Image (cartoon, helix red, strand yellow):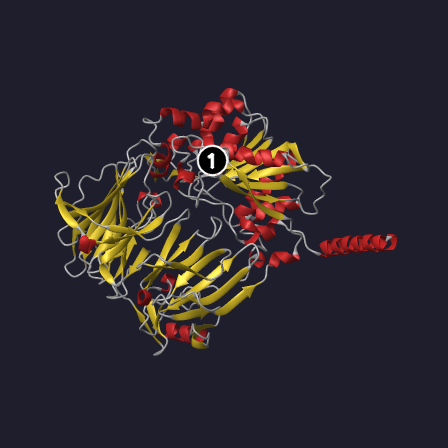
Amino acid sequence: MNKMKRISNLIVILLMITSAVVAQNKKNFTLEDLMPGGDNYYSLQVENLHGLTWWGDICIKPDMDEVKAIEPKKGKEKVLFTLEALNKALESAGINKVRALYTLSYPWADKTEVQLPQAQKFAVYNWKTGKVVVRDDLPKEPYANIDLNTTTGSIAYTIKNNLYVNGFQVTDEPDGVICGQSVHRDEFGIEKGTFWNPQGTLLAFYRMDQSMVTDYPQVNTSTRVATLEPDKYPMAGMTSHKVTVGIYNPESKQTIYLKGGDPTDRYFTNITWSPDGQKVYIIELNRDQNHSQLFRYDAVTGEKEALLYEEKHEKYVEPQHPITFVPWNEHQFIYQSQQDGYNHLYLFDLSQGMMHPIETYGPTKLMIPYTQITQGEWLVQEILGFKEKTQEVIIMSTEQSPLQSNAYAVSLKDGKRHLIGAAEGVHHVQLSGSGRYVIDNYTSHATARNIRILSTSGKGEGHEMLSATNPMDEYNMPEIILGSIKAADGKTDLYYRLIKPVNFDATKKYPAVIYVYGGPHAQMITDVRNYGAGGWDIYMAQLGYVMLTVDNRGSSNRGLEFENCTFRQLGTEEMKDQMKGVELLKSLDYVDESRIGVHGWSFGGFMTTNLMLTYNDTFKVGVAGGPVIDWKMYEVMYGERYMDTPESNPEGYKKADLTQRAGDLKGRLQIIIGANDPVCVPQHSISFLRACIDAGTQPDYFIYPGDGHNMFGRDRVHLYTRITRYFEDYLK
C-alpha cells in the first residue's frame, strides 16, 4: 500500500516537473503580440479564409494568386481566373493593377463577371472573355457611398454632401444639408443613404438638413495655427436635424420628395421597396422613441397612402430592421419586433388588409392580419435571406444560448425550424443565391475556427474548407473561466469571465481588475476564443492580475426587459450588478480586496468613473477611456432613447452627471481621450477636470492628438502600454 502511495506521489511530482518544463518552453506575450497595430498581432490571429463569397450557388474562394470556384455539394474546385490574367486585362484597359483578389465582388450570378474594387475606378472584368469594361461616366474627383443596381447597371454615389447617379448631379445642396448618406448618426440600424427599387428604375435617398444643429468646435492642432473643424452634434434636449426622403427617376432625371409631413423631431428609419418597385415602406419614430409607425408611400406621387402597423411602449421602441418582403408572395412581408420582450419575426399579409380612413394623416389605416413566426426567450439577430423552394427564412439567433449566434431555417408555413451547422459557438454565415447553402465560419472557446459549406436542410456534414489551430497555444496562457452570478435584483443570471494569473498560485494574494463596458448594444462575453477576452486582459493576467468582466443588466442579447431596466437612470442598475462581480472577487481567497481596479472605454469609461466615485472605498485605481461624464452633452438619438430629455428627466440626468460627484474621488483615476472625439466629445472630460479642480481632487489626464473615439495602429499599442503602466504603478 505504502509502495503504491510512493509511486503515486512520484508520478504527481514528475507530472508537475513536466508541466513546469513545458511552461518554460512556451513564450510570454508582449503588447506587440496582443494589440491591433502591434508588430506581431496578426501572427496570433486564428487562420481565416478571406474573401469567401457566393456567385449564385457557387462558392468563391480567392487567394493571393487565383480565384477558385467550389461546387457546394461535393466540394469540387476549379480555377476561374488568376491574378496574372486579371492584371494583364487591367493593363490593357489602362487601369492600375491589383495586388490581391480578396476584395472583388460577384453581383451577377448569371454572368462571368466580377466587379473591381472602387480604387480601380468602377470597372468590371469578364474572366471568360478576358476583357475589362470601365465606366467613363464617373468623376475624377473623390466619390463615396457607391450603390450599384445590378439589374440596370445604374450607379448612385456621393461627392461631398451631394448625390449623383450615372454622372448626373441629382442634388445641389448648400453646406449643412447632406444627401445620399446615412442619417440619424447611424442609429436604428441605418447603414447607408441610398436604396434602389428592385427594377433599378427609381432611387430612394435620405436628405438630412442639419443647418439648424449646433456646431461642436472640434480643433485641428496639426496646423501651425490650430484651426476649427466643427462637427454637427445635436446634444440631448437640443435642436436635432430634419430628415426627408427623396425619390429620383434616372430616366426623367426628376426628383420628388415623399409627403411625410413636418420632419421636425421625427426619425425616418428603415426603408423598403415593394416588389413591384412602386411603393416605399418606412418605419417612422417620434422623438420620444416610444411610438413607431409603418407607413406606405406612393413612389411616383410621394403621397402617404396608408398606416400599416404601429407599436408603442412606455419606455422605448427601437426599430432596427427594415421590413422584408417574401420572394414567393409579393403581398407578404416580415416585420421584426420586440413586442413580446424579445426580437422576433411577424408575418404580415397585405392581401388580407382592410382600409379605414384616418383624419389625422389624410390617407388610410390598413389593418393587416399577422402571424408570429418565432417565439421564445431568445431573439432573432438577423435575417440572412430565404429558401424559396421550401418557403423558409434563414436567420441568426440566440436560441442555443445568449452567448452564441447560430443559423436556423424557419418555415413560414408553420414556424418549425432546424439548426444549420454546429450547436456551439458564434457563427458568421453567408447565404447562397438560392438559399440552399451557406458558408459557415464559426469559432468557440473550444474551436479556433471551422469553415464549412453546409446545406440549409440541416442534413449532412458539408464540405470543410478550414479547421484552424489556435496560435496562442504556443504561449503561456492563463486559465479562463466562464460562470454566472445573480444580478442585484436577486433573480437574473449574469454571465462573467474570470481570468486567473499565469502560473497561478492559490496561496498568493493577487490584485484584480474589472474590465467593464456595461452599455446597450454590446456584449463582452460570448462563446468565442477565450470567451471574448481581449489581448489586454490576457496580458494583464500574465503580469499577475485577476481579470473579471461581467455583462450587467442593460447590455445586449438578453431581451428587452434585461436591457431597458436602466431606462432614465443610466449607470445605476449597471453599477449594482458590477458590485456583484466585486462580491465574487472578494469571495476568492487569492484576491487581495484592497487592490481592486477598473478599466473601460466609452460607456465603459462612464462606468469606470462612476464606480470610482460611487464605491471609492472599493476601487483603488481606474482608467476611464473616452468617458461620458454628463449625458446632457451626449447626442440626441442614443441619449434620449435611454434617458429621455434633460427637461423631462432632470433627476435622472443629475444623478448620472459625474461632475456633481467629483469631490468623491479617492483613488487614482486616469482619464484618456482622443483630442477630436466626435462621439464622446472632449467637453465631457474637460468639464470633469474643472469639477475636480474646484473640489480639490486629483485625477490624471492624457490626450491623443488627432485621434477620435478610439486609437488605432501604433497609437493603440501606445495606449495600452500607458494603461498597463498606470495599474503597475498604482495597483500592483
Quarter of the rendering containing residue 598: top right
Q: Nearer the viewer, residue 590 or 125?
A: 590
| Residue furthest top as drawn | 695
**Vertical comparison of 206 with 447: above or below:** above
Local crowd size for mark 1, using a 10 Å CA cut-off: few (<14), some (14–19), many (≥20): many
User: Relative to residue 128, is residue 295 depicted above or below?
Assistant: above
Q: Position of residue 433 (x, y in %)?
A: 34, 67
Residue 158 relative to residue 78: left or right? left
Residue on which disc 1 sits:
627
| Residue 658 can be seen, yes or no | yes
Position of residue 713 in the picture relative to residue 162 (left or right): right
Q: Nearer the viewer, residue 676 or 321?
A: 321
Task: Give the residue type that dot 1 points to.
Answer: Pro
- The residue located at (58%, 25%) in the rendering is 666
Please provide percent x and percent y for residue 161. Answer: 28, 48
- Which is nearer the eye, 322 or 73? 73
Q: Secondary structure at mark 1?
A: loop
**Residue drawn at x 71%, y 41% as measured from the top left:** 506
Residue 163 location (% of width, % of height)? 25, 53
- Residue 499 percent coordinates (x, y): 61, 45
Q: Name above or below for residue 223 compared with residue 138.
A: above
